[in-house]
Amino acid sequence: MNILVIDTATEACSVALEVNEQVFNRFEVCPQQHSQRILPMIDEVLNEAKVTLQNIDYLAFGRGPGSFTGVRIATGVLQGLALGTGHKVVGISTLAAMAQQAYMQNHSKQVTAAIDARMSEVYFGQYQLQQSVMTLVGNEQVLAPEDAAEILSKNSEMAGVGTGWQAYPELNASAKIDELTDILYPNALYMLPLAKHLITKGDATEVEAIQPVYLRDKVTWKKLPGRE
């Protein structure tokens, strides 16, 4: 199973390619440069592996949550690649990707992922290990750090990944979280096992059916009186 994965949902930009059980990847923290970097990074891993897009079986992307612009960049690039090749695609949660990295690097089996969502909120999800992949417990959501801290106060000890912990120290008011400060952003490399899991389950789909995940249904702003 040959898979190409891309992610631009946060300040990080990453690409991972698995071909014939060999893995090639790129990862950069490059805020506001994703649209300039993502295609060259794709070319780099393809050239390193000595393959073309036609040699790939499936495409995957970080479907969010994350910045609106970042999620749209990955979605648009994936659509272009898939329409040009006819490959089926899968979307990978950025929160789950960080939880998977915590398992693969630190053997963490219970992980809470929190990404700074701005506007005094975090993108929040809790994961536990099932069959070697980190699996969502409950729902991914966007909420105030204080509300997330209340949820965490009812849980046992677990690892914490993402930018949310540093942005909002009140998240860890329960002191039950072991913050993994080396895992701040999703990385396409750790989306590979999640992508293979979904493909094996039969969840790969045509590109027209992919859905980015923003969690915020609308932009928050104060409307004028009478304009509700």
Image (cartoon, grey):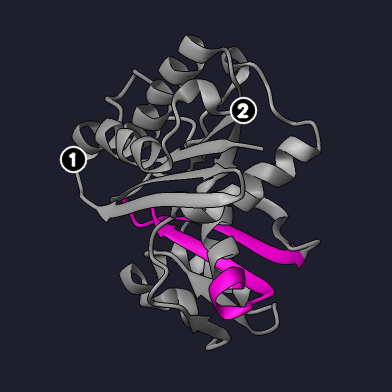
Residue 36 as seen in the image, left or right of residue 53: left
Please give the range of residues in magenta.
Answer: 103-129
Q: Which residue position holds label 2?
A: 57
The Cα atoms of the two marked residues, 2 and 1, are separated by: 28 Å
Quarter of image, res 165: bottom left
In the figure, 37 relative to 159: above or below?
above
In the image, what residue occupies the spot 62% across and 17% down? 209
In the image, what residue occupies the spot 57% across and 37% down? 3
Q: Which residue position holds label 1?
A: 33
Give the mark nearer the N terminus: 2 vs 1.
1
Query: Closer to the camera, 161 or 167?
Result: 161
Query: Closer to the camera, 7 or 49?
Result: 49
In the image, what residue occupies the spot 37% across and 64% down? 163
**Image quadrant where one finds the N terminus:** top right
Residue 35 as seen in the image, left or right of residue 185: left
Q: Is residue 221 visible?
A: no
In the figure, 183 relative to 122: above or below?
below
Mark 2 neighbour density, 10 Å: few (under 14) some (14–19) many (20 or more): some
Q: Is residue 183 magenta?
A: no
Query: Closer to the camera, 119 or 184?
Result: 184
In the figure, 158 relative to 49: above or below?
below
Q: Are marks 2 and 1 in contact (CB under 8 Å)?
A: no
Helix, strand or loop at mark 1: loop
In the figure, 33 relative to 113: above or below?
above
Q: Name which residue type carries label 2.
A: Asp
Mark 1 neighbour density, 10 Å: few (under 14) some (14–19) many (20 or more): some
Quarter of image, res 156: bottom right
Q: Position of residue 197 (x, y in %)?
A: 73, 46
Quarter of image, res 55: top right
Query: Closer to the camera, 71 or 123?
Result: 71
